[in-house]
Structure formats: C-alpha cells, structure tokens
Image: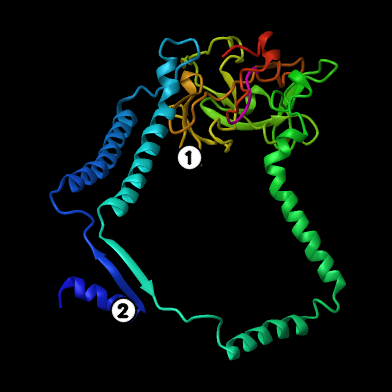
C-alpha cells in the first residue's frame, strides 16, 4: 500500500473517512511559490530576531551606568532589546508554524461517522440514574444546609479573591502619606524626636567598631522594637582593610565611618537577601539569581540580572561609641518599581541623588 492508502486506512480504522486529501497547490505553480515565500518569510524573521538577540546579549553595552552618564541610554535599552528580540523570535516562529499548517500541509476534508438522533434509551436512562443517585445519596438537595452555604461562601470568596489582585491598586493609595509612604522609608529613619537608630545584632546588642575584624562583614538590624523582622531592614556592615580603595557614589560622600561601610542586604533584583561575601575580591553574591555587587566600586552590580547598586546607609558613632544611622537611605531599598526615583517629594535633598 502507498503512504496515502495507509493514511486513509488508518483514518478509517478510527471511524474517519478522508473525503478530500491531497496537496494544496500544484507543485511549482505560482500559488505554490507564493505560499512557500509567505511561510519562509516568517521563519526568516524568526532567524533574524534570534541572531539579533544573540548579538545584543553578547555585545550590547550592559554594564551599569548612572542616570547622568552619556552611556545610560544604551544601558537602559539592554533589557528591553533582549526581551523584544527573543519574544519576537518566538512570536514569528509560532506564526510560521500556523502558516505552514494552513498553506503547505495537505488539504483534507474528513468525515467521522456518528449515530443519528439521541443516544440509545438505555444509555440515557442509566446515565441519568447514575447522576441523580449520586446527588440523592450525598443529600446535597434534601439536607446539608451548612454544606450548601459553605459552598456558596467558598465560591463567593474565590471570586472576590480573583478580583482583588486586579482592583486592589484602586482601593488604597500607596502614596497617601507622601514622602513618608512605606516604599520610601525604612526603620532606619530617625525617630520623631531626632534620636538616631543604632546598628544592632539580631538579639538587639548594639555594635561597636571593635566588634568587627578587618576584612569582615556582619549583618546588622535597626535597634528598634522588632527591628530584625522588618523585610527592608537588614544591612551588611563591612570593615575593609586599611588603605583599601572604595569608590564613593555621587551624593553619598561621608556615608562611611573610617573603614566601615554599611549597605542594604536586600537585592535590587527581586529582593532576595544578599549575603555571600568574598573578601579577596570584594564581591557580594545574591544566591537567588547570582547577581554580584562590587563593594570596592560602591556596590554596583557587575554580574547577573540586578540593575541598580545596593543602597548605602550613612553611619557614624554616637556619644557612647556605638554605630548609629545618621539618616535613612537616600534611595529606595529592594527591587525597582515604577515610581522609583520619580516621586515629587524626591525633588528635595537628598532623595533625588543617585
């Protein structure tokens, strides 16, 4: 049997008759060539976008640039461009596959044999008997009012939960408190009476300079009630070795105290804890997605998906010789968000500085 005869036989064994089955266009005809060119164009676009993705991923300048750098635009376009090219490649591949099925693959009209009218009387009666027997034995209609009520509540609760995510942003204004809104401030902000917040260990013990050895790092928390439980509070306190050069970012001069530097422990990618410190290179690694930050270059990201430096906490010593935060962070802690750096209140010093 030929391949076509085998195909028809296989369909017939499944109760399907191929009424029409064959090529769509005469091979070599103008219509056949047009169809081939149309499908090929989509696959060609797939290849072009895929190659562009590889080129941009490997060679486009992706190193971090500040907002005031001449190269900042090229850096800012890196992620959108790799998303556009890779997404476009996948899109064109999908369109090409659909076009291939519609324009190139054999045309067929298939008929599957089905019985006329209703199902047999015995089939209909046995099915209805099974359904109503289950309902009757469960007692859902005649009794179990609590169960029926709970089902209604469950359905309503799930429906409400499904809409909250979409409508939640319209219910509460996250910026109602202006510059004091939660995304702008952390527990490191001085108290209302001006009292500065101490750097403490997890058990609340305040930290002195002599508690850290040269080249070491310690995680500290704000010395307030529950300070170790705030998600945006953990800070890495570093004591670098004497004469170790560290780049200071614009607007953050004097944030360090001697050889001591404090940076947020919250990764600027998706908020994982940054905690793996390599003394020899000054690299700090986020274990979630392998973003790396360079302590010696002001905690700028040097590898991985993070695109912003870790915010630096300004520190000094109080009258008793303990570390305190002189102010809150001057930039938002954690992952980026739409309003980051755009809030009107940041127009006053020092929030607008990078």
Q: In front: 205, or 24?
A: 24
Q: Secondary structure at mark 2?
A: helix
Rendered residue at 77%/35% (across/down): 171
Rendered residue at 58%/20% (across/down): 261
Write the start and end of the magenta stretch as one range. 330-335
Residue highlighted by disc 2: 12
> Which percent across, then down, holds residue 102?
31, 52
Magenta-drawn stretch contains 88: no
> Which percent across, then down, holds residue 267?
56, 32
Rendered residue at 30%/71% (across/down): 18
> Which percent across, then down, holds residue 122?
59, 91
**Going by the image, does 74 lie left or right of 171?**
left
How crowded pointer 1 is (Cα within 10 Å; few <14, some 14-19, many 20+) is rated as some
- Can you tell which quarter of the image residue 40 is in? top left
Q: Which quarter of the rendering shows the N terminus?
A: bottom left
**Going by the image, does 162 lie left or right of 97?**
right
Instruction: Residue 289: give its label.
Output: 1
**Position above or below: 154 against 252:** below
Q: Are marks 2 and 1 in contact (CB under 8 Å)?
A: no
């Amino acid at each position: 049997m030929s391949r076509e005869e085998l195909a028809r036989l296989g369909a017939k064994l499944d109760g399907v008759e191929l009424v029409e089955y064959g090529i769509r266009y005469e091979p070599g005809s103008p219509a056949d060539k047009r169809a081939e060119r149309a499908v090929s164009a989509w696959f060609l676009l797939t290849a072009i976008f895929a190659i562009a993705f590889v080129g941009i991923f490997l060679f486009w300048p992706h190193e971090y640039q500040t907002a005031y750098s001449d190269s900042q635009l090229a850096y800012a376009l890196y992620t959108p461009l790799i998303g556009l090219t890779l997404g476009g490649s996948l899109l064109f591949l999908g369109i090409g596959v659909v076009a291939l099925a519609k324009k190139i693959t054999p045309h067929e009209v298939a008929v599957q044999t089905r019985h006329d009218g209703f199902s047999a009387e015995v089939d209909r009666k046995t099915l209805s008997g099974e359904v109503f027997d289950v309902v009757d034995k469960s007692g859902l209609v005649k009794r179990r009012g609590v169960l029926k009520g709970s089902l209604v509540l469950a359905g309503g609760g799930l429906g409400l939960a499904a809409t909250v995510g979409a409508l939640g942003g319209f219910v509460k204004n996250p910026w109602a408190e202006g510059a004091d809104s939660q995304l702008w401030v952390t527990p490191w902000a001085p108290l209302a009476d001006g009292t500065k917040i101490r750097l403490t260990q997890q058990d609340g013990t305040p930290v002195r300079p002599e508690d850290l050895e040269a080249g070491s790092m310690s995680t500290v928390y704000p010395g307030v009630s529950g300070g170790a439980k705030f998600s945006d509070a953990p800070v890495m306190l570093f004591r670098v070795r004497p004469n170790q050069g560290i780049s200071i970012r614009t607007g953050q001069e004097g944030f360090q105290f001697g050889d001591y530097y404090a940076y947020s422990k919250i990764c600027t990618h998706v908020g994982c804890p940054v905690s793996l410190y390599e003394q020899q290179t000054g690299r700090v690694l986020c274990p979630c997605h392998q973003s790396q930050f360079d302590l010696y270059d002001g905690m700028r990201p040097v590898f991985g998906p993070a695109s912003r430096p870790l915010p630096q906490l300004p520190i000094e010593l109080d009258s008793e010789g303990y570390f305190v935060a002189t102010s809150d962070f001057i930039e938002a802690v954690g992952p980026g968000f739409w309003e980051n750096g755009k809030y009107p209140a940041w127009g006053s010093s020092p929030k607008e500085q990078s």
